[in-house]
């Protein structure tokens, strides 16, 4: 507990340091001189640090319970927002209370970068869940133009599937192809990577096989209905959302459970493996550039 308090005080002191802006301005100049770093593409992401201590009574203490990336929902944490260059050189950071929602942080970071480095045409690369529709609309209308490239939940892919099906694939590099769909002032980029397909397919097969075997083990055990439901819940958690959704499980009031593979859903899942959807307000002149920008975010993470 003492160590966690010291760490929190040091973080807070660094955040409040009056020399932060001057320090980052100096570092920006040095990185430009030493590495030829450019600052027209910025990668934005959030991380968290948890503390094994009680919830602080001081309301100004940022250590709070919240969504835990470390799967330690029992621990208080702080959220650290970081803006870096594609080379991984930090441009700005901010610390938020541990119960801060990701989507509420972007506007503050946009203002911080503009205040520290002035207005300029920049490209912000982010994961899904960070920008809200309101902030993206503001970026599209900003002057000077601020561009963005952001990951998109697969739920939106369902809505756009029919329109995307009519678009041709474009190969941007070996084993990587994309489809481009302009829509309402934005460009949607559907990418499919063979390497990612192989990885996701192997993971899904392994989890589905383990889940199927566990269901048949439970089917042969003499368990009360309540105990069976409890063990089924644990098995579903271990299998993961995708694998568990592929099997229809029925637990009758009497008799043994039944499990059936949902082959139609399996075909749908197979068709989407290795695919991810991006959205941007950039032009479609170079699809490979859009993909490389997003891969830089993955690499830096």
Image: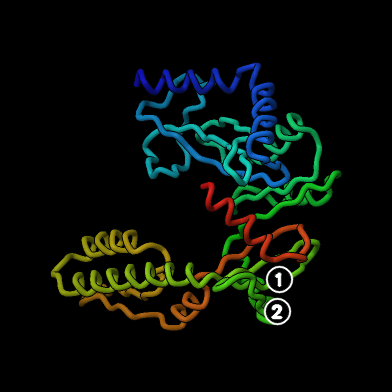
Residue contact at pointers 2 and 1, CB within 8 angstroms: yes
Which is nearer the eye, 213 or 12?
12
Q: CA distance from mark 2 to mark 1?
A: 7 Å
Residue at the spot x=24%, y=73% of the render?
Answer: 213
Sequence-wise, the earlier of marks 2 and 1 is: 2
Is the residue marked by circle 2 packed among few (<14), some (14-19), or many (20+) residues within 10 Å?
Answer: few
Is the residue marked by circle 1 packed among few (<14), some (14-19), or many (20+) residues within 10 Å?
Answer: many
Q: Which residue is mark 1?
A: 180
Residue at the spot x=46%, y=22% of the render?
Answer: 8
Residue 191, located in which quarter of the rendered image? bottom right
Q: On screen, 216 above or below 93? A: below
Which is nearer the eye, 40 or 224?
40
Total numbered labels placed on residues in the image:
2
The percent coordinates of residue 188 (x first, y second) are: 70, 65
Q: Which residue is mark 2?
A: 167
Q: Is residue 177 left or right of residue 180?
A: left
Q: On screen, 248 above or below 52? A: below
The percent coordinates of residue 283 (x first, y second) are: 78, 62
Q: Is residue 263 left or right of residue 24?
A: left
Residue at the spot x=18%, y=65% of the render?
Answer: 224
Which is nearer the eye, 214 or 57?
214
Q: Is residue 135 left or right of residue 20?
A: right
Among all residues in the image, which is located at the extreme right?
Answer: 143
Q: Is residue 226 left or right of residue 83?
A: left
Regarding mark 2 in the picture, which secondary structure is present there?
loop
């Amino acid at each position: 507990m003492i160590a966690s308090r010291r760490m929190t005080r040091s973080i807070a002191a660094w955040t409040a340091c009056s020399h932060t802006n001057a320090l980052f301005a100096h570092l920006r100049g040095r990185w430009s001189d030493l590495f030829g770093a450019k600052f027209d593409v910025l990668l934005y992401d959030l991380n968290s640090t948890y503390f094994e201590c009680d919830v602080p009574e001081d309301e100004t203490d940022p250590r709070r319970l919240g969504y835990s990336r470390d799967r330690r929902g029992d621990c208080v944490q702080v959220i650290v927002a970081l803006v870096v260059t594609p080379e991984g050189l930090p441009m700005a950071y901010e610390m938020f209370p541990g119960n801060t929602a990701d989507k509420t942080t972007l506007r503050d970071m946009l203002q911080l970068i503009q205040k520290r480095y002035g207005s300029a045409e920049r490209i912000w690369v982010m994961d899904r869940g960070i920008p809200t529709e309101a902030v993206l609309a503001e970026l599209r209308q900003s002057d000077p133009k601020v561009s963005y490239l952001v990951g998109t939940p697969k739920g939106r892919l369902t809505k756009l599937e029919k329109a995307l099906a009519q678009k041709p694939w474009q190969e941007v590099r070996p084993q990587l192809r994309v489809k481009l769909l302009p829509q309402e002032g934005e460009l949607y980029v559907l990418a499919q990577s063979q390497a990612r397909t192989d990885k996701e397919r192997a993971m899904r097969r392994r989890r589905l096989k383990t889940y199927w075997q566990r269901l048949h083990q439970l089917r042969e055990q003499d368990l009360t209905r309540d105990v069976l439901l409890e063990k089924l819940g644990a098995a579903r958690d271990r299998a993961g959302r995708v694998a568990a959704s592929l099997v229809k499980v029925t637990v009758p009031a009497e008799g043994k459970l039944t499990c059936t593979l949902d082959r139609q859903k399996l075909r749908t899942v197979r068709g989407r493996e290795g695919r991810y959807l991006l959205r941007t307000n950039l032009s479609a002149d170079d699809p490979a550039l859009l993909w490389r920008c997003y891969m830089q975010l993955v690499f830096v993470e």
